[in-house]
Image (cartoon, rainbow, N blue to C red):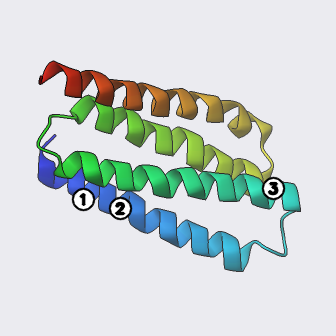
């Protein structure tokens, strides 16, 4: 995966994070319970934070491809499962969320290892 593709993927995730955050704030406020709205907001928070992380990884001089992949998968599994669960109430998706969290953790650990390898 080349740097240009990584930047484009980070930008798509950043765009989606802002769009889904706005949708949650303006379109879902009256239709979700407070608990489900907080769940949705948690998805947006992690989505946006990790979108910025993807962009930083893409712009870095280090080779963070594996970290980039795990964090991308983390956004999909963690945030999107929370979006679906909070809006549709399908409990299965709430059970997917921890796999996204683990994917985020692996991505962060890989960043540590990749920077240690270059010293």
The answer to which of marks 3 and 1 sits earlier in the sequence is 1
Distance (Cα) linking label 1 and label 2: 6 Å
Q: Which residue is mark 3?
A: 36
Q: Tell how many labels.
A: 3
Q: Is residue 56 above or below residue 95?
A: below
Find numbered disc 2 in the image and state the secondary structure of the residue it sits on.
Answer: helix
Find numbered disc 3 in the image and state the secondary structure of the residue it sits on.
Answer: helix
Label 2 CA crowd tier, 10 Å (few <14, some 14–19, many 20+): few
Q: Which residue is mark 2?
A: 12
Residue contact at pointers 1 and 2, CB within 8 angstroms: yes
Residue contact at pointers 3 and 2, CB within 8 angstroms: no
Find numbered disc 1 in the image and state the secondary structure of the residue it sits on.
Answer: helix
- Determine the residue positioned at 49% across, 44% down: 76
In which quadrant will I find the N terminus? top left
| Residue 23, image x, y percentages | 63, 73
In which quadrant will I find the C terminus? top left
| Residue 72, image x, y percentages | 39, 42
Q: Is residue 12 above or below residue 73?
A: below
| Residue 65, image x, y percentages | 22, 34
* Residue sticking out furthest to the front: 119
């Amino acid at each position: 995966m080349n740097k240009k593709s990584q930047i484009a993927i980070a930008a798509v995730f950043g765009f989606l994070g802002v769009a889904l955050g706005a949708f949650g704030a303006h379109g879902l406020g009256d239709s979700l319970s407070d608990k489900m709205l907080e769940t949705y907001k948690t998805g947006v928070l992690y989505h946006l934070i990790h979108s910025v992380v993807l962009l930083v990884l893409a712009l870095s001089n280090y080779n963070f491809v594996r970290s980039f992949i795990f964090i991308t998968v983390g956004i999909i599994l963690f945030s999107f499962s929370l979006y679906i669960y909070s809006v549709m109430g399908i409990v299965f998706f709430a059970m997917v969320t921890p796999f996204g969290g683990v994917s985020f953790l692996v991505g962060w650990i890989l960043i540590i290892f990749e920077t240690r390898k270059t010293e």
